[in-house]
Each structure stands twice: as structure tokens, then as C-alpha cells.
């Protein structure tokens, strides 16, 4: 569904992405992992067209994304740090997004808006919201349009345990609906029962991209965190 | 395009600055016309004020507006929208609201006190200057991420077009005063949108006779239909050229 070939991106002297190729298929839930600054967010932003790669190609459903922009109507994106026009209320932001994405004749999925209790604080301005509440708005917007692909950049960072559990349940439900889900997170324990594939990056390069089951089998570990620790230590050795 | 334009314009109107700008223009125009007994003299004083205020406010407001919409731009870039649509909507929204402010603030008083070809030329030139400086402002804003640098660059550009350029031209004139420079002057005036509009308005006012031999050359060139068409083309180029460069810049920008 999403195929990228040899994408490279340089920020000044720093190589954020170095010849990364990906192949993400429908129905998978992929964990994008790697240390801070390993290029995860840059990769996500390149897929979304927010960052323009210096080299390489990205195809979405067989179409080159540089020529096409409508493909983004199939993506729900939750940024790591959501920034919103400060003077707009939550309701205005949600209505604006609905207005802009009107053509994607799908039904709106307001599950998260309701379960996060955002419908009760619709009149609040974005500027007055706490970090966690802003994250809730970002999450609600990502799921609102029933998109086929969900890209979640550290979705649970900053959320309270209850909300983060609600979000995880929602992700599991959407996974069962056969959507492609990309998640980055540093909390490996919460990814254990969610993901089907692991995509590990280091210093802008792809270290490995494996099925979770294969990874566990290879290392003989049952926990994702231990499996990754083991594979990294064998790679270094 | 229409949808985004709607959000941009609503946002600008909610921002009180444009309203204050309208009132400022209105107060300046009315007081100038009431201070002079002769509306023609009033128009001349107004000319100098408009040639300074309109570019200044348009360039600074537009630059700041683009930087303040960083969140809005970031939010919409990940949505199914063409980047050019977003950028052109911001440009059109700024141009439309500032032009409207100029029409209300300066257009109405001019039409009330001096509704003839000269007044009309002045309104049209004011509108052109508005859009030209919005275009230059978004070019400056697309060049750097740093808000302070961007605004600084805008102010420098305004200073250049209002003062420094004329000083350079004068310097050039004195250095080469032994040569016939009238043709060169016509060419040089195309390099500054403010000069282009000033010349058009002055020619309408029939005081070019006061400008000596260069004035006569200007009259000969800019007074003809070809000259008028050329100077409008010049102003249009000043709108389109910066806009296209800024669009290219924005399309390749990382957000």
C-alpha cells in the first residue's frame, strides 16, 4: 500500500534519512522503533508529504505522491506535537477539518471525541488546552475520517493512563477492521499485543523490518522489549 | 481553494488590525481633505502619505500574518490539499482583505472629494501597491523560518523601495549627469513599484511640467496608451513574480 524506495533526506549536515526503503501492506500494524533522532518522524512526515525528500520515490497505492495529493484523504495522522490555530475552539477546528475533507464521503467516526469527553469542552480555545487534551484532539482528528491508513506519532505520550487505554482499545478495533496502522512509541510494553511487524531504525538507516512473530522466534523472547534488546546486542557484537 | 480562503478571511477579519488600518486611512484622508481648501492640493498631500503608509502596513501585516499562521499551515499540509492551494489562499485572503480596507478607508473619501480621473488613478494605484506588497511580504516570509528575521527582511525591503532606491537613483543621476539619462530613468522606474505608481498619479495631476526635461520624457512615455499599458504590466509583474518564487519556495519547504 505504501512503498518507498531509497528515500534520503538531509538537514544541514545531519542525514535524517539515509537510503530508507519501506513496504507497508494493508492490514498490518507496524511499530516504527528507534532511538531519539533516528529519523522516525522524518520518515512519517515524508510519507505525508510534509517533508520533501532529497532523493527517492514514495508510492501510495501505486501512485507517486509528488504528483498526487488526494491520497492524503486516505490517511489519518496524529502528530507527535499537535499545533493548532490558537484562537480557534475545539469545535471550530473539528468543523474545519470536516469541511476540508468533505469529499471523502465516509461517515465520521466520533468514537474518540465522545469517549475522551471532548464534546463537553467543545467551546474551549486551543490555546487554553493542556498538552494532554491537545493530544486527545489530535487523536480524535486522526480517527475522525475513517481513513484506511492511520499514522500515529507517539500517540500515548502525555495521555493519562485511562485515556491511553481508551486509545489503545480504539487502535485494536481499527486493526481488526483491516487498516494499515503505523505507530511510533518508546513504551514498548504497550505495543506488545498491538503490533504485527517491527520496523527498527538507527541513525537514519533501516536496521531491520520483521514480523513480530519471526522476531520473537528468532530471539526466543516473549516480550518485544527483550527481543529488541537481544537483537541489538547481537548486531553490535 | 474557496473553503481555505473563507477560513483565512474570517481569521483576518477577526484580527482587529485590519479594522484599525481602515480607520487610520479614513482619518488621514478626511483630515487631509478638510485641511486644504483645494481638493487637488489635498490629493497631492494624500499621495505622499499613501505611498508611504500603504506599502508599510501591507508588508508588515502580511509577513506577521504568515508567521502567525504557521500552525494553521502545518495542520492543513497533512490534509488532502494541494500546497499551492493553501499558499494562494493565504495570498488571496490577505490581498482581498487589505484591498477592501483600502477601498473603504481611502477610496470612499477620495471619491467624495475628488471623483475624477486623478482620484480614480490614485485608488487603482493604491490597490496595486497593496497587492504588490502582500506578494513581496509572503516572499520574504517564505525565505526564512525565523520570525524576527522575516519581519526584519520585510522592513528592509520597504525601506529600500520607499527611500534607499530613490537615493540610489539620485546618486546615479549625479554621477552620470554629463550623459543623457532620460531613457535610463524610464527604465529605472520599472524597478520600483512605488515609483511606477507615483509617476502614473503625477502625470494624471498635470504637474509633470514642474519636473523639467525628465518630466517631459516621462510624459512622452508614460502618458501614451502604450506607456500606461506597460506600467500596468510592470506592476502586474511585481505581483506575479514574487508570488511565483514564494510558491516554489513553499512547495519545497519542510514543515
Image: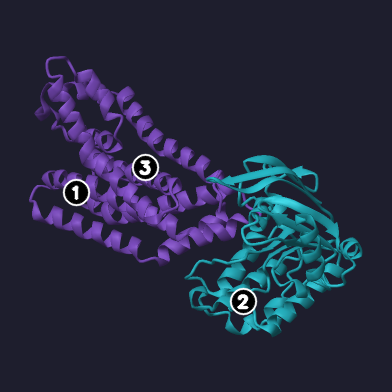
Residue drawn 69% across the image and 69% down it: A186
The label nearer to you, 3 versus 2, is 2
* Rendered image: mark on residue A158: 2
Residue B231 left/right relative to A72: left
Q: Are marks 1 and 2 in contact (CB under 8 Å)?
A: no
Residue contact between numbered discs 1 and 3, judged by CB atoms under 8 Å:
no
Residue B98 locus on image (x, y percent): 36, 53
Residue B101 or residue A116, whichever sits in front: A116
**What chain is the cyan one?**
A
Q: Which residue is label 1 attached to?
A: B49
Looking at the image, which residue is at 63% across and 80% down? A118
**Callout 2: chain:** A
The residue where tag 3 is placed is B132
Structural crowding at the residue carrying mark 1, measured as other residues with C-alpha within 10 Å and reported as few (<14), some (14–19) or many (≥20): some
- Asked if residue A143 can be seen in this view, the reply is yes
Residue B142 location (% of width, % of height): 45, 47
Amino acid at each position: 500500500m505504501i512503498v518507498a524506495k531509497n528515500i534520503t533526506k538531509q538537514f544541514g549536515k545531519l542525514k535524517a534519512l539515509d537510503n530508507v526503503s519501506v513496504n507497508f501492506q494493508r492490514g498490518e500494524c507496524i511499530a516504527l522503533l528507534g532511538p531519539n533522532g533516528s529519523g522516525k518522524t522524518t520518515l512519517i512526515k515524508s510519507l505525508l508529504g510534509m517533508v520533501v525528500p532529497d532523493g527517492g520515490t514514495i508510492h501510495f497505492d501505486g501512485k507517486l505522491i509528488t504528483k498526487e495529493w488526494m491520497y492524503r484523504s486516505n490517511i489519518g495522522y496524529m502528530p507527535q506535537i499537535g499545533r493548532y490555530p490558537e484562537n480557534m475552539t475545539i469545535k471550530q477546528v473539528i468543523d474545519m477539518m470536516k469541511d476540508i475533507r468533505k469529499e471523502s464521503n465516509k461517515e465520521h467516526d466520533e468514537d474518540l471525541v465522545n469517549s475522551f469527553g471532548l464534546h463537553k469542552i467543545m467551546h474551549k480555545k486551543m490555546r487554553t488546552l493542556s498538552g494532554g487534551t491537545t493530544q486527545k484532539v489530535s487523536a480524535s482528528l486522526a480517527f475522525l475520517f475513517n481513513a484506511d491508513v492511520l499514522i500515529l506519532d507517539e500517540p500515548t505520550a502525555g495521555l493519562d493512563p485511562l485515556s491511553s487505554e481508551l486509545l489503545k482499545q480504539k487502535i485494536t478495533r481499527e486493526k481488526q477492521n483491516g487498516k494499515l496502522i503505523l505507530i511510533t512509541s518508546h513504551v514498548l510494553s504497550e505495543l506488545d499485543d498491538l503490533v504485527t511487524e517491527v520496523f527498527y531504525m538507527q541513525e537514519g538507516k533501516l536496521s531491520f523490518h520483521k514480523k513480530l512473530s519471526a522476531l520473537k522466534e528468532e530471539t526466543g523472547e516473549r516480550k518485544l522489549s527483550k527481543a529488541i534488546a537481544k537483537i541489538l546486542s547481537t548486531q553490535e557484537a | 481553494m474557496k473553503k481555505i480562503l473563507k477560513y483565512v478571511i474570517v481569521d483576518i477579519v477577526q484580527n482587529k488590525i485590519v479594522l484599525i488600518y481602515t480607520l487610520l486611512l479614513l482619518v488621514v484622508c478626511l483630515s487631509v481633505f478638510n485641511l486644504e481648501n483645494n481638493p487637488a492640493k489635498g490629493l497631492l498631500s494624500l499621495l505622499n502619505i499613501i505611498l508611504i503608509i500603504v506599502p508599510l502596513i501591507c508588508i508588515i501585516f502580511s509577513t506577521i500574518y504568515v508567521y502567525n499562521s504557521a500552525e494553521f499551515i502545518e495542520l492543513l499540509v497533512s490534509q488532502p490539499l494541494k500546497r499551492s492551494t493553501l499558499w494562494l489562499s493565504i495570498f488571496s485572503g490577505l490581498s482581498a482583505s487589505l484591498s477592501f480596507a483600502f477601498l473603504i478607508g481611502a477610496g470612499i473619501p477620495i471619491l467624495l472629494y475628488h471623483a475624477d480621473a486623478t482620484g480614480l488613478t490614485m485608488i487603482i494605484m493604491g490597490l496595486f501597491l497593496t497587492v504588490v506588497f502582500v506578494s513581496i511580504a509572503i516572499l520574504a516570509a517564505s525565505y526564512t523560518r525565523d520570525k524576527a528575521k522575516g519581519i526584519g527582511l520585510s522592513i528592509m525591503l520597504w525601506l529600500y523601495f520607499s527611500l534607499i532606491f530613490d537615493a540610489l537613483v539620485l546618486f546615479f543621476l549625479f554621477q552620470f549627469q554629463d550623459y543623457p539619462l532620460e531613457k535610463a530613468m524610464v527604465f529605472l522606474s520599472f524597478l520600483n513599484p512605488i515609483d511606477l505608481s507615483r509617476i502614473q498619479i503625477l502625470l494624471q495631476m498635470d504637474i509633470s511640467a514642474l519636473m523639467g526635461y525628465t518630466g517631459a520624457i516621462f510624459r512622452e512615455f508614460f502618458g501614451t496608451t502604450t506607456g500606461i499599458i506597460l506600467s500596468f504590466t510592470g506592476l502586474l509583474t511585481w505581483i506575479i513574480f514574487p508570488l511565483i518564487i514564494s510558491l516554489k519556495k513553499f512547495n519545497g519547504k519542510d514543515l
